Image (cartoon, helix red, strand yellow):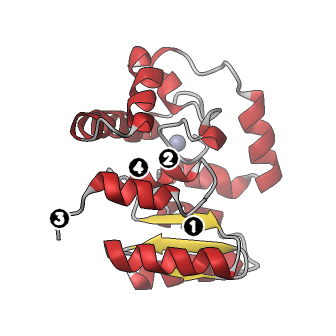
């Protein structure tokens, strides 16, 4: 099945996920992650997500707060089970969500609240090419990676961001109607 990316993208936006979901979705399309994890808003939104997933060939699993979307049902189930497990699952979930192992280890050894503090404390600390892995714009949908890097010069994260940027360029050329692809390139190409 050849998928019309512009259709898929616009239908995805109509699902009303947080803006940051655009980063996750484009990482998925760029084959830099195989699962996406989003908060959901309950049955009405889930119905729409179901239609979208069927139309574009995705599978999904959800619990009361989150939905995991991917192409492999086993992986989706594994991720949702990890998500609700009381044990520290940050490493395994990170790996499943496509984060580098160094950054998944980093997530495991810090509390979730600490990661938020670390993210804020790093404002302006990403230098030169590593500004590609700055996640300060993630909540607004402007980032090239969807995880907090283990350090401000994490090379594994940088490699993902580079691949994402070149993928964005291809998408933008083929889909000039989608402004967001172009915005991503404008924001990040200067640091490359
Ligand atoms: Zn790392």
Q: Looking at the image, is mark 2 or mark 1 earlier in the sequence?
A: 2
Q: Is residue 12 left or right of residue 135?
A: left
Spatial distance from mark 2 to mark 1, Cα to Cα?
18 Å
Residue 26's tag is 4
- Do callouts 3 and 1 mark residues in contact (Cβ within 8 Å)? no
Q: On the image, numbered disc 2 is attached to which residue?
A: 23
Spatial distance from mark 3 to mark 1, Cα to Cα?
30 Å
- Residue under the point 65% across and 78% down: 44
Residue 183 visible? yes
- Which is in the foreground here, disc 4 or disc 3? 3
| Secondary element at tag 3 | loop
Q: Position of residue 168 (x, y in %)?
A: 33, 37
Spatial distance from mark 4 to mark 3, Cα to Cα?
17 Å
- Residue under the point 60% across and 34% down: 151
Q: Position of residue 103 (x, y in %)?
A: 56, 48
Q: Looking at the image, is mark 3 or mark 1 earlier in the sequence?
A: 3
- Do callouts 2 and 1 mark residues in contact (Cβ within 8 Å)? no
């Amino acid at each position: 099945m050849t998928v019309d990316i512009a259709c898929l993208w616009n239908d995805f936006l109509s699902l009303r996920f947080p803006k940051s979901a655009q980063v996750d979705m484009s990482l998925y399309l760029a084959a830099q992650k195989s699962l996406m994890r989003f908060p959901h808003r309950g049955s009405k939104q889930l119905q729409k997500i179901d239609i979208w997933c069927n139309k574009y060939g995705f599978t999904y699993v959800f619990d009361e707060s989150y939905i995991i979307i991917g192409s492999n049902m086993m992986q989706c189930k594994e991720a949702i089970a990890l998500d609700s497990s009381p044990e520290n699952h940050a490493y395994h979930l990170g790996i499943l969500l496509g984060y580098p192992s160094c950054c998944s280890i980093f997530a495991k050894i810090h509390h979730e609240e600490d990661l938020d503090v670390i993210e804020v404390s790093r404002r302006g600390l990403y230098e030169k090419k590593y500004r590609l892995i700055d996640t300060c714009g993630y909540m607004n949908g402007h980032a090239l990676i969807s995880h907090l890097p283990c350090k401000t010069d994490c090379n594994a994260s940088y490699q993902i961001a580079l691949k994402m940027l070149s993928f964005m360029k291809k998408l933008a050329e083929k889909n000039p109607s989608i402004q967001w692809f172009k915005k991503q390139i404008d924001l990040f190409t200067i640091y490359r």
